[in-house]
Image: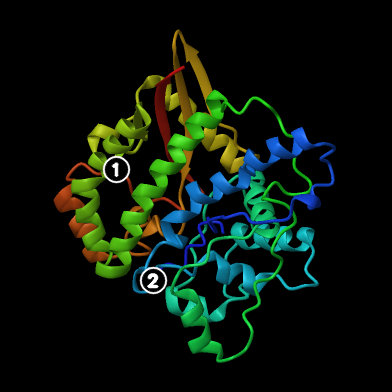
């Protein structure tokens, strides 16, 4: 089944801000305004890193594997929808995607139901806040598509935002824009996840799960290495139950892995772990399963089909990476970068 991955809205996304300066209620003078114009809403980067894999407005219509976020915004926001109501709807949807909860049955029919994506609730809040407050990019083909579906009915874009993307309830603007070590590590993990996810989901949608296994076998490590070169970092995905022996966690990583397992099982908000080692920062964050993962990592005879299991055994004779359920820690990001 094709994947309707609002990858929060995991996913949702992409912004371009053209709002009125006068809407900033907390700006007191011209210098504050000038600084605000260059300050990005934190939800914008979260949206791009987490959601572009499936909802990129630069993607051609025939290559889309999920609806563009302008379509999501139009469907979920009317003139009567408050920001609180919209954020609540997005949080509810991201926590438990279902046909009953969806306001986009046509998209579900076309792309399939979005698999559950593991995101901290604060991430969903920030992304939803950004979408509500800001104009988001519209694909070049979208207006023609909309007119073919709805004729001459005006295209309702919902709230277009108040301000150039900062949101009315965001923290006070800070002058130091340098990301923290935690933020930098999360950005590296999220962009690498997006690049891997974009390629993997495309393979599953176009060629099926077995083709995706071939893709992962050949391309997953090279893609990860290329992202490491871009970020000037050392990037690994490691686990206690490896499919590829190169992804086996070491003793220290196993301890972090167990810690994350307990947090996810308890349903608490998961925070990244950063460790300072001289001039180097180590970053750790969990990789959590969703319904899509179970196509290759689920229970044999249940989510994991016989032909898929046979292909796994062919490619990975010592595979240990099956038997997972949704919302379990499959592994962790293990990232190192210099300060």
Drawn side of residue 67 relative to residue 267, left or right? left
Q: As drawn, which residue projects farthest toward the bottom?
A: 151
157 vs 23, left or right, is left
Q: Which mark is residue 1?
A: none
Q: What residue sits 58% from the left and 42% below the top? A: 265
Of residues 270 and 154, the one drawn nearer to the viewer in this rendering: 154
Q: Is residue 290 above or below residue 71?
A: above
Q: Is residue 96 left or right of residue 6?
A: right
The residue that appears at 58% across and 60% down in the rendered structure is 136
> Compared with residue 69, is residue 15 higher up or lower down, i.e. above or below?
above
Kindly report the distance in space between the C-alpha atoms of the residues bearing marks 1 and 2.
Answer: 27 Å
Residue sitting at 63 percent across and 75 percent down? 103
Is residue 258 visible in this depiction of the protein?
A: no
- Provide the residue designation for mark 1: 320
Q: How is the image coloured?
A: rainbow
Task: Measuring from the top left, give residue 142's x and y in whole percent.
Answer: 48, 75
Q: What kind of element bears circle 1?
A: loop
Instruction: Tell me where residue 314 appears, x and y as whole percent.
Output: 14, 52
Dot 1 and dot 2 residues touching (CB under 8 Å): no
Which of these two is toward me, 247 or 119? Answer: 119
Residue 210: image quadrant is bottom left
Q: Which residue is mark 2?
A: 2
Question: In x, y percent, where is residue 52?
Answer: 45, 55
């Amino acid at each position: 089944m094709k994947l309707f991955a609002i990858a929060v809205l995991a996913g949702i996304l992409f912004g371009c801000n053209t709002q009125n300066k006068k809407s900033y209620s907390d700006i007191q003078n011209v210098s504050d305004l000038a600084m605000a114009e260059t300050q990005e809403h934190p939800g914008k980067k979260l949206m791009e890193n987490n959601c572009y894999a499936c909802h990129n407005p630069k993607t051609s219509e025939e290559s889309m594997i999920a609806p563009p976020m302008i379509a999501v915004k139009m469907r979920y926001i009317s003139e009567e929808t408050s920001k609180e109501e919209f954020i609540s709807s997005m949080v509810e949807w991201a926590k438990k995607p279902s046909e009953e909860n969806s306001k986009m049955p046509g998209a579900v029919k076309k792309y399939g139901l979005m698999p559950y994506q593991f995101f901290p609730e604060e991430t969903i809040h920030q992304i939803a806040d950004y979408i509500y407050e800001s104009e988001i990019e519209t694909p070049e083909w979208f207006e023609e598509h909309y007119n073919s579906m709805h004729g001459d009915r005006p295209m309702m874009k919902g709230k277009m935002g108040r301000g150039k993307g900062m949101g009315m309830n965001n923290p006070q603007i800070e002058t130091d824009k340098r990301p923290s070590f935690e933020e930098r590590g999360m950005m590296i993990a999220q962009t690498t996840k997006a690049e891997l996810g974009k390629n993997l989901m495309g393979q599953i949608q176009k060629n099926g799960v077995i083709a995706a296994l071939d893709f992962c076998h050949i391309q997953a490590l090279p893609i990860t290495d290329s992202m490491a070169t871009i970020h000037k970092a050392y990037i690994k995905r490691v686990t206690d139950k490896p499919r590829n022996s190169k992804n086996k966690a070491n003793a220290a990583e196993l301890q972090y892995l167990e810690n994350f397992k307990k947090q996810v099982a308890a349903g608490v908000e998961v925070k990244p772990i950063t460790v300072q080692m001289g001039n180097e920062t180590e970053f750790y964050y969990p990789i959590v399963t969703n319904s899509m993962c179970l196509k290759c990592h689920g229970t044999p005879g249940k989510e994991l089909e016989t032909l898929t299991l046979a292909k796994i055994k062919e490619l990975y004779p010592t595979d240990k990476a099956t038997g997972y359920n949704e919302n379990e820690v499959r592994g962790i990001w293990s990232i190192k970068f210099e300060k």
